[in-house]
């Protein structure tokens, strides 16, 4: 068990996400770049890098870059996001939005009536926002996440949020000084399967 700082940058305009996770001493452990074609994961300590086509894995399928940005920003992996959700909440104790991989797997986004942010569950993995920012319910950010799977239990706390209008592509650059392996499997992408919530 350990803790360490991390920084995440994302741009829906550029369709880019860049994340760096560090150990307790501040040394880099994992760097991630997600773009419109897939994701690159680089582990400096291990001297290894992996390229995954189509997105970033979540459970048994992939989330694309825009879905991942939406998830980080609102807790809901789809665009449009919270306004669509809030419009359908009146008088309901629990709302479910369903996603399917097309290969028999499913992912459920659950929003309880008294919750500000939804949680996500799929086979063997769950992602739950534990705390939210001080904004109103249409502008709030998830500030703390709990990720639980068969191999990992992780809590991510966001200490500061910086919203800027534009960022340069250079700020997302990931330099990988080792050969990049390409994951030789075809993973499907999560697809929104219910246009309205299942109650």
Image (cartoon, grey):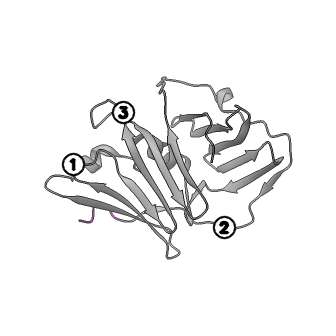
Cα distance between the residues tagged 3 and 2: 37 Å
The disc label shown at residue 133, or none: 3
N-terminal of the pair, mark 2 or mark 1, is 1
Report helix, strand or loop for mark 2.
loop
Residue 195: say if magenta: yes
* Identity of the residue drawn at 66% across and 42% down: 33
Instruction: Write down the residue under mark 2.
Output: 186
> Which residues lie in the magenta part?
194-199
Q: Is residue 119 left or right of residue 39?
A: left
Report helix, strand or loop for mark 3.
loop
Q: Is residue 107 above or below residue 159?
A: below
The reply to whether dot 2 and dot 1 touch (C-beta < 8 Å) is no
N-terminal of the pair, mark 3 or mark 1, is 1
Q: Which of 137 and 158 is in front in this view?
A: 158
* Identity of the residue drawn at 20% across and 58% down: 93
The image position of residue 94, as x and y in percent, is: 24, 59
Q: In this view, does 94 lie to the left or right of 131?
A: left
The reply to whether dot 3 and dot 2 touch (C-beta < 8 Å) is no
Q: Which of 122 and 38 is in front in this view?
A: 122
């Amino acid at each position: 068990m350990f803790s360490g700082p991390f920084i995440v940058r994302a741009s829906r305009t550029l369709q880019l996400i860049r994340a760096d996770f560090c150990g307790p001493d501040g040394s880099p452990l994992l760097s991630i770049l997600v773009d419109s074609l897939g994701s690159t994961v680089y582990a400096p300590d291990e001297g290894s890098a992996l390229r995954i086509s189509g997105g970033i894995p979540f459970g048994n399928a992939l989330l694309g870059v825009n879905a991942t940005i939406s998830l980080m920003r609102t807790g809901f992996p789809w665009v449009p996001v919270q306004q669509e959700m809030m419009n359908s909440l009146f008088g309901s104790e629990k709302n479910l939005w369903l996603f399917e991989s097309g290969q028999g797997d499913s992912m459920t986004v659950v929003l309880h009536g008294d919750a500000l942010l939804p949680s996500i569950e799929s086979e063997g993995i769950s992602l739950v926002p534990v705390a939210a920012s001080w904004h109103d319910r249409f502008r709030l950010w998830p500030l703390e996440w709990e990720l639980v799977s068969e191999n990992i239990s992780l809590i991510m706390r966001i200490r500061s949020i910086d919203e800027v209008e534009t960022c340069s592509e250079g700020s997302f650059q990931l330099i990988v000084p080792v050969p990049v392996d390409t994951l030789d499997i075809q993973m499907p992408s999560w697809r929104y399967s219910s246009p309205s919530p299942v109650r």
